[in-house]
């Protein structure tokens, strides 16, 4: 069978069966969950990986025996590698100015700090972490350090070890930092050898058992950003257990902005500093008032599909339906919905908003931008347009295009004067630029508007944190800016 005849087989009920088999293979060997919204991607991947072989025959062969080369090919085709240097700089600021000074005070020299970068892709995040640690209090504090980085994608890891990066990877790196931490490498740049020696790269799946690697209290700092959202339920539970076990006393775990540990572990609690949230061990928190823990609602008697879907997206868990059906033993025992949930308001518009947000949060930034663009028209209500502009701003932040992101946040705030979240992001961006007056102005505005922010917007954009936690984030940052 030739490659040209393959698409004929990928139609209708037969195609659905083939894609479900591929989805099961990916979950079994990579621990990844690919929902039905990614069927086009799965279809193209099946076509490409099967090559001249019939897709059904290729799947049958892999179901019988999947080699490491087969797993590597699936990982290269289906994992998202969107990353760049100094991504989400507020988390790096929190690490450098809040977490590490406390850690040094708790661990007098001589002591070695061990950091973990989980889901490191092509290495930009791991090397950024090395630059952050190098310019922190660790050196003056007499503390040595190293970084372990891993990913499931062998091709990405090879790029990380080669460490040759173009201007696009350095798009959020100030020229002064580029000149300080990199040296020219042909048409691109490479991190200094002194930094590269600090980072060790490994191929690993986060959910696979490995007691030697996931030793209790082994890592002081863990970055696992925008990785948990891709895992299927059993892998997610195991991954969170690994992270909670491996985090050392006084250490911190940083997740992606759209990820939450709500209902997944009681070993870690939420903390806040320098404009972002991070997690620390429960027994490290000296007083309950110092921890910003999202409210835990009573266990529902059954699960609303919207509740489950928004939980997987990292959004705030909604209320239970209260039906009489018995509750499953775990939220993951309930069937996962095949459609992204609708919140309130116009059905088509809200579905498109949630779809766009899902695309951005899972690395498909350009697709998310296109969905939002279709909503920014005079025929769409102003509040929906504001939401779409806000999602576009988040997407541009993900791409490291911060001036454009700021402009879109400003447009979202102008489109709906009652929308708090753009002001919160504008305040954090101003703080990052070193503009305290602008940061205070925006954060005060966000603090005031959060009192009346709609529950739908908090659920969609709150990242799993409810109103009071976001208010506390603004309040603490205003105190830091005095």
Image (cartoon, rainbow, N blue to C red):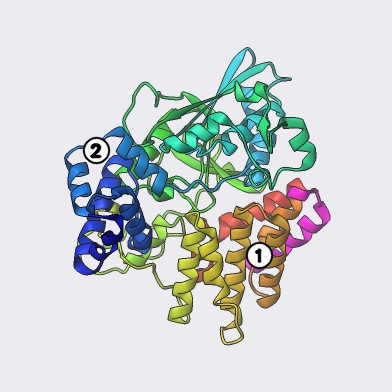
- Majority secondary structure in the magenta region: helix
- Examine the image and state in which quarter residue 469 appears: bottom right
Question: In the rendered image, which residue does mark 2 sit on?
Answer: 66
- Image quadrant holding the N terminus, namely bottom left
Residue matched to label 1: 422
Q: Residue furthest bottom?
A: 379
Task: State left or right for residue 28 relative to residue 189.
Answer: left
At numbered mark 1, what does the secondary structure look like: helix, strand or loop?
helix
**Precedes in sequence: disc 2 or disc 1:** 2
Q: In the rendering, at what x and y percent does residue 241 appear?
A: 37, 36
Q: Nearer the viewer, mark 2 or mark 1?
A: 2
- CA neighbours of label 1 inside 10 A, class few (<14), some (14 to 19), many (20+): many
Q: Which mark identifies residue 67? A: none
Q: Is residue 216 found inside the magenta-colored segment of the image?
A: no
The residue shown at (70%, 29%) is 136
Up-down: is 378 above or below 421? Answer: below
- Magenta span covers which residues? 432-455
Residue closest to the eye, 34 or 6: 6
Give percent across and percent down for residue 329.
23, 51
Q: Is residue 454 among what the camera can see?
A: no
Circle 2 crowding by C-alpha within 10 Å: few under 14, some 14–19, many from 20: some
Q: Nearer the viewer, residue 182 or 255?
A: 182
Q: Estimate the x, y position of residue 120 in percent, counting from the top left.
A: 51, 37
Q: Residue at x 75, y 50 (%)?
A: 431
Magenta residue check for 437 = yes
| Residue at x-position 48% and y-position 80% | 345
Between the residue at mark 2 and the residue at mark 1, the CA separation in whole angstroms equals 47 Å
Horizontal arrangement in the rendering, residue 142 relative to residue 1 (left or right): right
Location of residue 9 in the rendering, given as x and y in whole percent from the top left corner: 23, 63
């Amino acid at each position: 069978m030739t490659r040209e005849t393959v698409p004929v087989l990928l139609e209708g009920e037969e195609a659905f069966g083939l894609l479900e088999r591929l989805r099961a293979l990916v979950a079994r060997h990579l621990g990844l969950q690919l929902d039905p919204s990614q069927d086009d991607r799965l279809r193209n991947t099946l076509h490409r990986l099967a090559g001249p072989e019939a897709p059904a025959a290729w799947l049958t062969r892999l179901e019988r025996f999947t080699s490491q080369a087969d797993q590597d090919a699936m990982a290269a085709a289906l994992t998202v590698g969107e990353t760049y240097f100094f991504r989400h700089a507020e988390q790096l600021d929190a690490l450098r100015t809040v977490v590490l000074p406390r850690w040094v005070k708790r661990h007098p020299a001589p002591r070695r700090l061990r950091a973990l970068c989980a889901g490191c892709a092509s290495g930009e995040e791991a090397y950024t972490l090395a630059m952050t640690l190098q310019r922190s209090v660790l050196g003056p504090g007499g503390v040595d350090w190293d970084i372990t980085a891993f990913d499931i994608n062998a091709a990405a890891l090879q790029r990380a070890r080669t460490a040759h990066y173009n201007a696009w990877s350095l798009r959020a790196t100030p020229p002064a930092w580029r000149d300080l931490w990199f040296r020219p490498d042909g048409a691109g740049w490479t991190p200094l050898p002194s930094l590269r020696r600090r980072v060790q790269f490994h191929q690993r799946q986060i959910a696979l058992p490995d007691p030697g690697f996931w030793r209790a209290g082994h890592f002081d700092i863990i970055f696992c950003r925008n990785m948990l959202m891709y895992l299927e339920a059993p892998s997610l539970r195991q991954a969170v257990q690994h992270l909670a076990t491996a985090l050392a006393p006084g250490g911190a775990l940083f997740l992606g902005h759209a990820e939450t540990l709500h209902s997944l572990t009681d070993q870690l609690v939420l903390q806040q500093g320098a404009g972002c949230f991070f997690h620390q061990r429960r027994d490290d928190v000296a007083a309950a008032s110092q921890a910003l823990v999202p409210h835990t609602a009573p266990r529902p008697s059954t699960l609303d599909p919207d509740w489950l879907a928004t939980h997987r997206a990292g959004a705030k868990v909604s209320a239970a339906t209260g039906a009489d059906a018995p509750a499953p033993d775990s939220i993951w025992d309930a069937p996962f919905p095949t459609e992204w949930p609708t919140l309130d308001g116009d059905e088509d518009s809200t579905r498109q908003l949630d779809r766009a947000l899902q695309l951005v949060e899972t690395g498909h930034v350009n697709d998310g931008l296109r969905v939002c663009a279709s909503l920014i028209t005079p025929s769409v209500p102003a509040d929906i347009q504001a939401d779409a502009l806000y999602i576009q701003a988040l997407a541009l932040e993900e791409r490291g295009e911060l001036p454009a992101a700021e402009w879109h946040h400003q447009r979202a705030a102008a489109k709906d004067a009652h929308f708090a979240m753009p002001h919160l992001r504008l305040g954090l961006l101003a703080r990052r630029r070193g503009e305290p007056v602008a940061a205070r102005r925006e954060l005060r505005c966000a603090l005031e508007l959060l009192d009346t922010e709609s529950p739908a917007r908090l659920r969609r954009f709150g990242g799993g944190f409810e109103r009071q936690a976001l208010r506390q984030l603004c309040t603490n940052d205003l105190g830091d800016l005095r």
